[in-house]
């Protein structure tokens, strides 16, 4: 009866392989393969950003720095927060976050808040919708 597991906060820890959240792509990855995943994610991020004009490039999200005693839940929460604040692209109209700019642009085309602001930003290469011009007052 006196096993190494004592009472803990919440339910008992899940059995099986443990996964961690990637601070770059937001996906869950097995702890045993995270180092390989992280290297691949960094390469993919840098490759994607290098294709953009220099003014539009975003820096690599920072890896959360937690102490050695941080729990898996704390590490995952910090990684998810880094992903949400540094890696996701926000709609300029409504602020909703997306995994990449292409997905955000698809959303922004139908976003009423973005349309009210004049469309997607000029840096995206898309122009605001035309209409109603040429009226003399």
Image: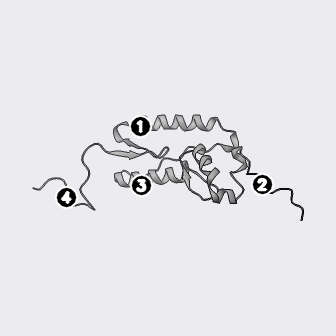
Of tags 3 and 2, the one toward the viewer is 2
Of tags 1 and 3, the one toward the viewer is 3
Disc 4 target residue:
6
**Reading the chain from its start, which is encountered first: label 2 or label 1?**
1
- How would you rate the neighbour count of disc 2 (Cα within 10 Å): few for under 14, some for 14-19, many for 20 or more? few
Q: Are marks 2 and 4 in contact (CB under 8 Å)?
A: no
> What SS does tag 3 mark?
helix
Rounded to the nearest angstrom, the CA distance separating label 3 from label 2 is: 45 Å
**Reading the chain from its start, which is encountered first: label 2 or label 4?**
4
* 47 w.r.t. 56: above or below: above
| Residue 69 in view in this figure | no
- How would you rate the neighbour count of disc 3 (Cα within 10 Å): few for under 14, some for 14-19, many for 20 or more? some
Q: Do the residues labelled 3 and 2 touch (CB within 8 Å)?
A: no
**Reading the chain from its start, which is encountered first: label 4 or label 3?**
4
Front residue of this view, candidates 135 and 67: 135
Q: Are marks 4 and 1 in contact (CB under 8 Å)?
A: no
Residue 77: give its label.
3
Left or right: where does residue 74 sit relative to residue 4?
right
Rounded to the nearest angstrom, the CA distance separating label 2 from label 4 is: 67 Å
Question: Which residue is rendered at x = 70% and y = 51% of the image?
Answer: 121
Rounded to the nearest angstrom, the CA distance separating label 1 from label 3 is: 18 Å
Rounded to the nearest angstrom, the CA distance separating label 4 from label 3 is: 23 Å
- How would you rate the neighbour count of disc 4 (Cα within 10 Å): few for under 14, some for 14-19, many for 20 or more? few
Question: Which residue is rendered at x = 73% and y = 48% of the image?
Answer: 122
Count of numbered badges drawn on the protein: 4
Residue 131: give its label.
2
Query: Which residue is outermost to the left?
Result: 1
Disc 1 target residue:
35
> What SS does tag 4 mark?
loop
> What SS does tag 2 mark?
loop
């Amino acid at each position: 009866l006196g096993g190494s597991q004592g009472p803990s906060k919440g339910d008992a820890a899940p059995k099986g392989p443990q996964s961690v959240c990637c601070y770059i792509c937001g996906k869950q990855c097995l702890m045993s393969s995270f180092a390989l995943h992280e290297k691949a994610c960094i390469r993919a991020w840098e490759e994607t950003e290098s294709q953009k004009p220099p003014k539009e490039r975003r820096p690599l999200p920072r890896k959360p720095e937690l102490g050695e005693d941080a729990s898996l839940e704390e590490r995952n929460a910090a990684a998810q927060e880094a992903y949400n604040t540094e890696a996701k692209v926000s709609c300029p109209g409504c602020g909703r976050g997306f995994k990449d700019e292409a997905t955000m642009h698809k959303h922004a085309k139908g976003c009423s808040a973005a349309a009210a602001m004049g469309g997607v930003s000029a840096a995206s290469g898309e122009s605001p919708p035309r209409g109603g011009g040429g009226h003399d007052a």
